Image (tube, helix red, strand yellow):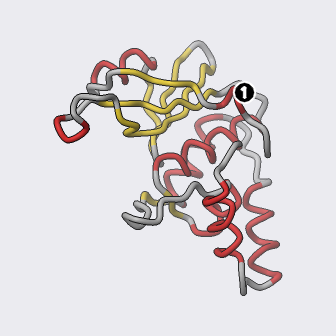
Amino acid sequence: MQISWWSKLWNWVYWIGKSDDDIKNAQIGIEHTCPNLSSLICWVEDRFEYCSDWPLIHWTQRPITTVHRRKGDCEDFAWLWYDQLTRMGYKPHVYKLYRRTIWTLWIPAWWHTITSVYVDDQYWVLTNNKALKLTMKGYFRDKGYCTLRRVDNDIKEK
């Protein structure tokens, strides 16, 4: 997972003042391994909620921070899905999706981040705290995105 210095700073700020028990419980949560995809989907859908970042302070949480907070926005969930699926032995991919809008002067602007994985002869799109049986092409077309970029192939930090 490659995150900006800004996100590293906010991840560090988040953990200031947290107790040893908080850190230990978050570590146990992140190391939780589900036996299959359906149990992972239930684990995420039942325990986590979508919550947008503050408008002017946008930061990407590490998966352990998402587990501790039990909430996050699209890229926080994308990296949580990626982390958990990788631990289970799958080969997921994280994508940034772009849209053209009038307020971006029709220039593609980053809009959403998702995870995609192929499991048991089925394509899955994992978006926020939901899982959809859908191909990337289907999701891309149905939601009106104009382009995408795979971002898990430039992972430098775990």
Crowding near the residue tagged with mark 1, few <14, some 14–19, many ≥20 C-alpha atoms within 10 Å = some
> Vertically, is 5 above or below 155?
below
Image check: 2 left or right of 150? right
Q: Amino acid at mark 1?
A: Tyr
List x then y, in percent, for residue 94. 58, 32
Q: What residue is disc 1 on? A: 90
Q: Residue at x 76, y 71 (%)?
A: 25
Q: Residue at x 45, y 17 (%)?
A: 135
Image check: 96 left or right of 93? left
List x then y, in percent, for residue 108. 34, 29
The quadrant in which residue 31 appears is bottom right
Image check: 104 left or right of 75? left
- Viewer-proximal residue among 133 and 157: 157
List x then y, in percent, for residue 97. 42, 30
> Vertically, is 47 above or below 151?
below
Q: Is label 1 in a helix, a strand or a loop?
A: loop
- Viewer-proximal residue among 107 and 38: 107
List x then y, in percent, for residue 54. 41, 67
Image check: 142 left or right of 6? left
Q: Residue at x 48, y 29 (%)?
A: 125
